[in-house]
Image (spheres, rainbow, N blue to C red):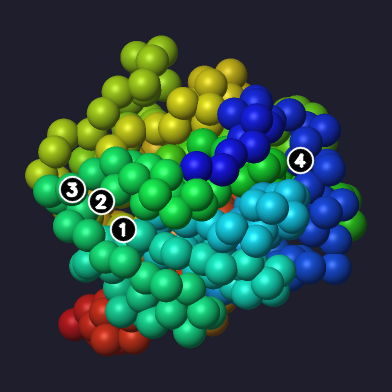
Amino acid sequence: MNSLLEFDKTPSYQSVRDAAEQLRGIVVRTPLLESKALNERLGARLFLKCETLQHTGSFKFRGAYNTLSRLSAAQKAAGVIAYSSGNHAQGVALSAKMLGITATILMPEDSPAIKLNNTREYGAKVITYDRYRQSREEIGEKIAKDGNLTLIKPYDNYFVISGQGTTGVEIVEQLKDQNIHADICAAPAGGGGLIAGTSLALRELSPRTKIYAAEPEHFDDTNRSLAAGERVQNQAGQQSICDAIVTPTPGKITFGINKLTLSGGLVVTDDETRAAMRTAFHYFKCVIEPGGAVALAAFLTGKIDIQDKTVVAIASGGNVDPALYSDILKEGDQ
């Protein structure tokens, strides 16, 4: 199995800056939206960072391209494998296509159809597994070893985390353009790559901004790990509508960063997440998938006091099946 020693290094603000240079002209500088009507309703100034409009519909493209573009010629020729519930899968698949690399992606068999189909359309070979009975880590390691492929982990990877952190760089720059300072920033957390990378950027560029991980009920492993001071696991057998961020435990590298940079965790229910998706559509005309809406949901439901504050919610992805999205929107009409 191919590997890079740097995969296991601890990212820093400098590695995020290096990623920003690597991704210049490649990633979309996604919009930071504001709704005066919603601000009036909340009594706060809320900005929505729409990574839903990133390539592949998710922030995951940032970390995937930053990683694949740095592989050696031999590693590129041999190919890569990744495991993912869908957004990392698409990020790796498109990055591989752009760089001429063969990609194999291991995905849960119950992944949203839009994520499975998109990954295949980007040219990757998709292998499915039962996420409730099988270990993606074990399957992925075996496939990588047997095929001499480089394993691109979804979050515990130096270049992946650094790439995701460019989201935070953009947020600070976009606010600075308006002479605005954020009091609080929240981001969805599964394995913790996005919030880890973003927190490295914010801690350096906007040290007064408090940073929170947002998670779905029953999958608040980052929140509970922060409270415990060590990584803890989610209880097996739980389910959530937030398929993109239902990881069993925080990453080792990501939690090492997050326990130093985060102010805490915010936990929301599936119903609160659905309501946030409707709010995003109504006020921002932004389509957010469930896992990508939890940060917004946390602000909308008062999980933290935002009165008279300026806050940023990262909408991390927009890859939601049309039928499910339609049903969620219709729920608001009942």
Which badge, 3 or 1, is on the more N-terminal residue? 3
Name the residue rendered at 83%, 54% in the picture: 22
Which badge, 1 or 2, is on the more N-terminal residue? 1
Which badge, 2 or 3, is on the more N-terminal residue? 3
Q: Position of residue 263 (x, y in %)?
A: 53, 26
Q: Can residue 305 be seen by looking at this rendering?
A: no
Q: Amino acid at mark 1?
A: Cys
Query: What is the distance, in whole Å, between disc 1 and disc 4 at their CAs?
Result: 27 Å
Which is more toward the observer, 285 or 23? 23
Front disc: 1 or 2: 1
Q: Position of residue 122 (x, y in %)?
A: 53, 79
Q: Residue 16: which disc?
A: 4
Query: What is the distance, in whole Å, between disc 4 and disc 2 at their CAs?
Result: 32 Å
Name the residue rendered at 48%, 84% in the picture: 121
Which badge, 4 or 2, is on the more N-terminal residue? 4
Q: In the rendered structure, are the residues bearing label 4 and label 2 in contact, judged by CB atoms less than 8 Å apart? A: no
Q: Which residue is mark 2?
A: 269
Which is more toward the observer, 49 or 184? 49
Q: Which residue is mark 1?
A: 242
Q: Position of residue 270 (x, y in %)?
A: 24, 57
